Image (spheres, grey):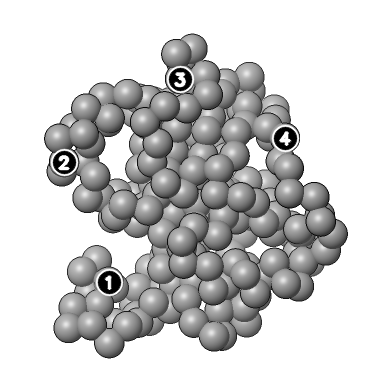
Amino acid sequence: MKNCVRPFKFDCKEKDVFFWGCLHLNHDPKWEIPLWKMRGFNSIQDHNDSIENNWKSNLNENSIIFLLGDTCFGYTAESYMDSFFDRVPFKTCFWMGGNHTAGWNQYLDKSNSNSQVVIGEKIVQLIPNYVEMFINGVSVVACHYPIISWNKQGKGGFMVHAHVHGNLEKTEIGKLLYKLKIKEVSIEKRATPLSFAELKAEL
């Protein structure tokens, strides 16, 4: 299996490329206040349904989406994601593992030599936690983790990340970092997937 990933290049409508992260589907730990409750939901089912509905409301069969890690939890994550990917619209999903990799690892085990899983007309492409891309010639770095310096940063390049659940912006370094062209796309910050068009408009 090849582990190297060249920068992706897309020539497409800016509203057709999306970024989202830390969905935490099926994450139902026995905490006093589990994550789904912190997010304002009454149950893990309400949480999962809201994420699915927000995906369906924003993407279509031509959409490309980058999932920036921590997507699905549990021993049944593979079968859940099979069903989830079957129900939601997209053309290609580029999926990072993040630091909670249950579903991602299960998909990697069943992927082909190119780290792909084909679901009907859809492609799920398993990717590392850091990738570079050009969307209509504009540089974007996507990473599960926030980083302070990225390729093409000094030339107007954007960076998107997940992982920190809205907490980094509350710190002194976060207050400085988010003055740059960097955007968090965790559920706590983005209830719906962020399109490239929105990324450009907001930064």
The residue shown at (56%, 79%) is 77
Q: Secondary structure at mark 1?
A: helix
Residue extending farthest to the top is 155
Q: Are marks 3 and 1 in contact (CB under 8 Å)?
A: no
For mark 3, does the 10 Å Cα neighbourhood hold few (<14), some (14 to 19), or many (20 or more) residues? some
Sequence-first tag of 2 and 3: 3
Q: State which tag comes first along the sequence, 2 or 1.
A: 1
Residue that badge 2 annotates? 171
Q: CA gap, disc 3 to disc 4?
A: 18 Å
Residue hosting label 4? 6
In the image, is residue 112 above or below residue 31? above
Marker disc for residue 35: 1
Q: Which mark is residue 153?
A: 3
Q: 10 Å neighbourhood of mark 1: few (<14), some, or many (≥20)? A: some
User: In this picture, is 150 found above or below 108?
Assistant: above
Residue at point 84% right, 59% down? 113
Where does residue 138 sit, x and y in percent of width and height? Answer: 57, 21
Q: Position of residue 96 (x, y in %)?
A: 57, 55
| Picture coordinates of residue 168, whole percent (x, y) | 24, 45
Upstream in the sequence, badge 1 or badge 4? 4
- Note whether 109 is above or below 31 in the view shown: above
- Binning the other alpha carbons within 10 Å of mark 4 as few (below 14), some (14 to 19) or many (20 upward) gives few
Three-letter code for the amino acid on which mark 3 is drawn: Gln
Nearer to me, 182 or 99? 99
